[in-house]
Amino acid sequence: MIKTNFKIENIDFGKSPDGLIPAIVQDCFTLKVLMLGYMNRESLEKTLATDKVTFFSRSRKCLWTKGETSGNFLLAREMFADCDNDTILVKAEPLGPTCHTGSTSCFGTDDDEGFIRELQEIIRRRKAERPEGSYTVRLFDKGAAKIAQKVGEEAVETVIEAVADNDPAMIYEASDLIYHLLVLLVHKGLSISDLETELRKRHK
């Protein structure tokens, strides 16, 4: 079930002479912007019905489901209309590269920005699927106390390398710290979003 903040009848397709509205697609895990397409009412309805992001091709004058040829579908998880009800934001799970060039994003932003959220999702899948031999699964099995202990150990090692002015080693240890903190959050049923909410409160 796709989460939305709109009803189709309230979307204003009439602002454009061709009845199309822009649809911005964002990776639901990393929040990276993946592509821009256009939707008419029919393609929006099909997206909501199938969970597969479907656009209207302005060049071919027909509907097209992203990935129908390549297999790199975009699975819609959340969809939001803007304040004017004439643009859609689609938060989707990409099943492979989004761009026809093989890049993650059509905007050439194939960097590591947002990977922490992707890692959080990987950790969640480890907890649910419990693959054999997984270090993450072993941590979950040992419980909150052991995971918290690892967070503390990695924090100390990060501090040691920072004081020693060893930046590469500090980055290595800080990466371990973030990973174990994510495991602890997932174990407790929490997420990065909960941290963001708390930090936003403090900022106010």
Image: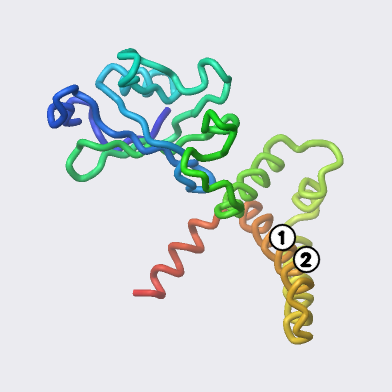
Disc 2 residue type? Lys
Vertical position of residue 139 compared to residue 19: above or below:
below
* Quarter occupied by residue 36: top left
Q: In this view of the protein, can residue 189 be seen by the observer?
A: no
Vertical position of residue 171 compared to residue 166: above or below:
above
Where residue 24 appears, x then y in whole percent?
Answer: 36, 38
Please tell me which residue is depicted at 57% across the width and 51% down the height of the picture.
Answer: 117
Task: Tell me if label 2 and label 1 are in contact, CB under 8 Å.
Answer: yes
Task: Say whether disc 2 or disc 1 marks the residue closer to the N-terminus.
Answer: 2
Where residue 31 appears, x then y in whole percent?
Answer: 48, 48
Please tell me which residue is depicted at 40% across the width and 68% down the height of the picture.
Answer: 200
* Quarter occupied by residue 204: bottom left
Task: State how far apart marks 2 and 1 are (Cα).
Answer: 7 Å
Q: In this view of the protein, can residue 187 be seen by the observer?
A: yes
Left or right of 4 in this view: 171: right
- Dot 2: element: helix
Q: How is the image coloured?
A: rainbow
Disc 1 residue type? His
Vertical position of residue 167 compared to residue 144: above or below:
below
Nearest the camera: 29 or 103? 103
Other-residue count near label 1 (Cα within 10 Å), few / some / many at <14 / 14–19 / ≥20: many
Residue lying furthest right: 133
Instruction: Provide the residue designation for mark 2.
Output: 150
Please tell me which residue is depicted at 76% across the width and 71% down the height of the picture.
Answer: 168
- Dot 1: element: helix
Where residue 147 appears, x then y in whole percent?
Answer: 75, 61
Instruction: Provide the residue designation for mark 1.
Output: 180
Please tell me which residue is depicted at 70% across the width and 58% down the height of the picture.
Answer: 179
